[in-house]
Amino acid sequence: MAQFRFVTLLCISSLLIGLCFSADPYVFYDWDISYITASPLGAKQQVIAINGQFPGPIVNVTTNNNLVVNVVNNLDEPLLITWDGIQHRRNSWQDGVLGTNCPIPVGWNWTYQFQVKDQIGSFFYFPSLNFQRAAGGYGGIIVNNRAVIAVPFGQPDGDISLFIGDWYNSNHTDLRKALEDGKDLGMPDGVLINGKGPYRYNTTLVPAGIDYETINVQPGRTYRIRVHNVGVSTSLNFRIQNHNLLLVETEGSYTVQQNYTNLDIHVGQSYSFLVTMDQNASSDYYIVASARFVNETLWTRVTGVAILHYSNSKGAAAGPLPDAPNDFYDKYFSMNQARSIRWNVSAGAARPNPQGSFKYGQINVTDVYVLKNKPPVVINGKRRTTLSGISYSAPKTPLRLADQFNLTGIYELDFPTRPLIGSPRIGTSIINGTYKGFMEVIFQNNDTTIQSYHMDGYAFFVVGMDYGEWTENSRGTYNKWDGVARCTTQVFPGAWTAVLVSLDNVGVWNIRAENLDTWYLGQEVYVKIVNPEKTNKTELPMPDNALFCGALAHLQKPQNHSTSSASSVVSGRAKLLFAPALLLATISILF
């Protein structure tokens, strides 16, 4: 009998230990999102913070981890958090945009839960509603390789995240009111680096008393520096005085490694560089993010400056800032720089197979959409922005939720493949994507300002860009071998950018301008991707904690606010503890 008990216990122990440790790990965060008073540029204003932090905390996970983030909305307006670049495999329910989620009401909490699957690299999160990103609420996401996957560079001595972005002293509510009244936002008041204003490199341009960011480093060591443009609408040039930036990754793709003395980083984009501290530290060094594609004389003060401080530095940084690119006579400078960013097809990514094995250039295209941007127009007496002649109007019932309950009349599945001829219109028109199709999207920018475009749930291959109007003949210039895969691309004024994307992720996914002003006024569209086969294996079910609004508001139950943590967070943690508890219970029964 004793031998039976021992063998039985050994078998059950092995089984349960396997259950405990073979499953993908869970990573938990509890966030209280609220306003704080801060003075990034010297003037007190209302800023959105997470757990009192601005910028918010870094989400640090490893591919295949299950991420659980409980969000408590202590703002005075509804809230959604979107996870820029995180692909939410089979799970658009967690995307955090109006097309898929009802907003989290004031005083409520909601738990995001999704698996970070098959991706690595540098991303960021931010509030997606009501122009809130202009007030903060953003932070970084680091997705690490699993230990069994090789990284195409040596282990850095440190990992540093920098958030750069233009900033207004006006509250986000005033900024969006200005847009609704038909006004331009005008020139920003400055550029922040990690939520702080510029170092006083110039006593005329920078007033005294502004807090600035200092990055402390050790001489001779190499650091991975992740840079995110989280601003409103300004492209920024990033550089570190006297240091080379070895580009190694962008938005989940390892790149061909090459040095830059500076790099244009457009709104919504993320890059990571290896920077070696190889200078003699005769003084501190400037870290600079300055406005691009603007009148530099007028925009001089729209410059962010932080300090790189060696531990053996002999004094404070002084003198002029390192020069920005001078491309007045070479409009291709920035575009050629962007073209030079290529995919490292010999490196593994989140999985053991090489990235280049995808061979995207050999896949037949099934759908072609030309998304044309023009300057803002007046529709029904309101200033609006459009894509292909349509200004998106968000319905009160999210698109994915309407599909789940078979509601009709919420949207039209009729977005045109080519720009409309005739008067622009406001509507809820979305793209009917072909499941497992291969879509070519051409972003044509006929406006006078640079724009960034992003697609949720996917990485796309940036295969071409040029000035002028895109034509069928433009395909002859495409890079069909090592165009970088990313989720946000820039489109220069009077130019086009072409991307290719494999539609293998079922759901309703957002394509939008990352420039907050053009996005807020209507420049977005959704892509609906449905598996025609009846199966529950290609999309996860609606979560138990789904919120209801619009035509389905009657289904929403009141929320119990006696605890700050959502039930699914508690449930998730309980699942991790269940197997050991079961093991102990089994032992007590047997013995």
Image: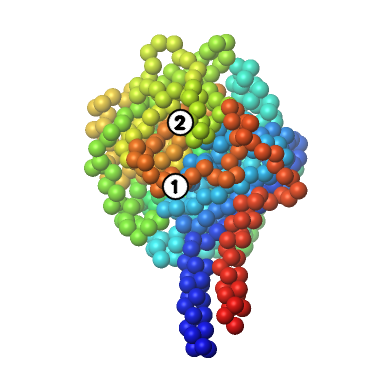
Dot 2 corresponds to which residue? 526
Position of residue 515 measured from the top left corner of the image (x, y, whole percent): 53, 31
Q: Residue 423: in sight, yes or no?
A: yes
Position of residue 368 measured from the top left corner of the image (x, y, whole percent): 31, 29
Residue drawn 69% across the image and 47% down it: 32
Residue drawn 48% across the image and 63% down it: 23
Residue drawn 40% across the image and 22% down it: 414
Helix, strand or loop under label 1: loop
Q: Residues within 10 Å of mark 2 (few under 14, many from 20)?
A: many
- Which mark identifies residue 89? 1
* Quadrant of the frame with the C terminus: bottom right
Q: How many marks?
A: 2
Q: Is residue 155 left or right of residue 190?
A: left
Q: Amino acid at mark 2?
A: Tyr
Q: Is 555 or 307 nearer to us in this picture?
A: 555
Q: Residue 494: in sight, yes or no?
A: no
Position of residue 75 measured from the top left corner of the image (x, y, whole percent): 71, 38
The answer to whether marks 1 and 2 mark residues whose Cβ atoms lie closer than 8 Å is: no
Q: Amino acid at mark 1?
A: Arg
